[in-house]
Amino acid sequence: MSKQFIKRIVYPVFKSRPDFLILGAQKAGTTSLYRYLSQHPQIIENNTWKEIHYFDKPENYYQGFGWYLGHFPAKLRKGNKLTCDATPSYLYYKYVPQLIKQDLGSIKMIAVLRNPADRAYSAWQMHKNFSMASHESLIKIADERSFSEAIDQELSSDFNCTEDLYNYIDRGKYVDQLKNYYRYFRGKDILVLNISTFSTDLEYVLNRVCEFFDIDKFSSEKIQNLREQKHNAGNYKMEKTKADQEKLELLKNYFAPFNESLYQLLGERYNW
């Protein structure tokens, strides 16, 4: 049998589908959440890296649903456990929720949010550091600009976010992204978390997730063990310059009305 036949015909029969999605946001703790949850006895990792990028990358989507299922464990191996796709750019792209609804139907999802100004700076640091990467694919998407230059360009009147790779600012407009998802999914099927609570009250966060999935809570001993773990912290931290600080203050003011709309949408306020 050809590989295409196996993916198209055989995989849908014996491969499991994802039970939930971690949508994003980028640089908001999705790797940490995925690693925490993968240590739960009722959750199983997928067969590949957490980020499958099926719904957001056309070159992957065009390979078909069988290709997607190939990233998940066989139904027999999975049993009654839950598995997920954790791709942090699903939240951002406007066309993604419609594709998810079309291919997966109603499914539970988690969105992890972060102060959008801090998220923008962290994303810039990551892309800036790619210039020193060993992989050609990362070097190609490195950002050689300073943070100040990047933000000034995105705030300029002629900036087109649909043609930009980075979109440090637009990715932080969470209220628009969530409203887009609410067009296709019930609000109760999307759990929204704030990354800051990962460090201040990890037990509360994980208990919320377990209740959301209707699975057993983590033990106190396991919670303590998870508190000592760090995932994808990044080795690219750079000291903020005066210009960086000034741009972060500018962004804090810029995002204020978007954040206020987000708080009203969620019925919950964050200290942003």
Image: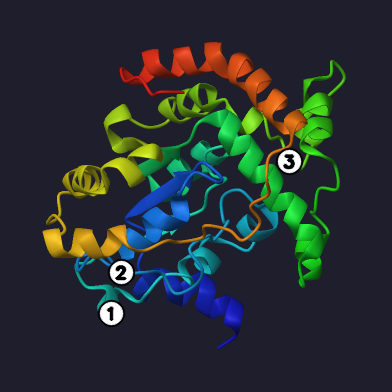
- Which is nearer the eye, 173 or 67? 173
Residue 10's image quarter? bottom left
Mark 2–mark 1 CB contact (< 8 Å): yes
Callout 1: helix, strand or loop?
helix
Between marks 3 and 2 in the image, the one whose residue lies nearer the viewer = 3
Q: List the residue tagged with mark 1.
A: 77
Say which label, 3 or 2, has the lower sequence index: 2
Q: Label 1, label 3: how many angstroms apart (C-alpha)? A: 38 Å
Instruction: Classify residue 239 as left or right of residue 151.
Output: left
**With respect to residue 134, does 178 lie above or below?**
above
Q: Residue at x 63, y 63 (%)?
A: 63
**With respect to residue 17, does 105 lie above or below?**
above
Amino acid identity at mark 3: Tyr
Instruction: Classify residue 185 as left or right of residue 138.
Output: left
Q: List the residue tagged with mark 3.
A: 166
Q: Label 2, label 1: how many angstroms apart (C-alpha)? A: 9 Å
Q: Residues within 10 Å of mark 2 (few under 14, many from 20)?
A: many
Callout 3: helix, strand or loop?
loop
**With respect to residue 87, does 45 lie above or below?**
below
Please identify the quadrant where the N terminus is shown.
Answer: bottom right
Instruction: Classify residue 109 as left or right of residue 7.
Output: left
Marker disc for residue 44: 2
Q: Residue at x 46, y 57 (%)?
A: 31
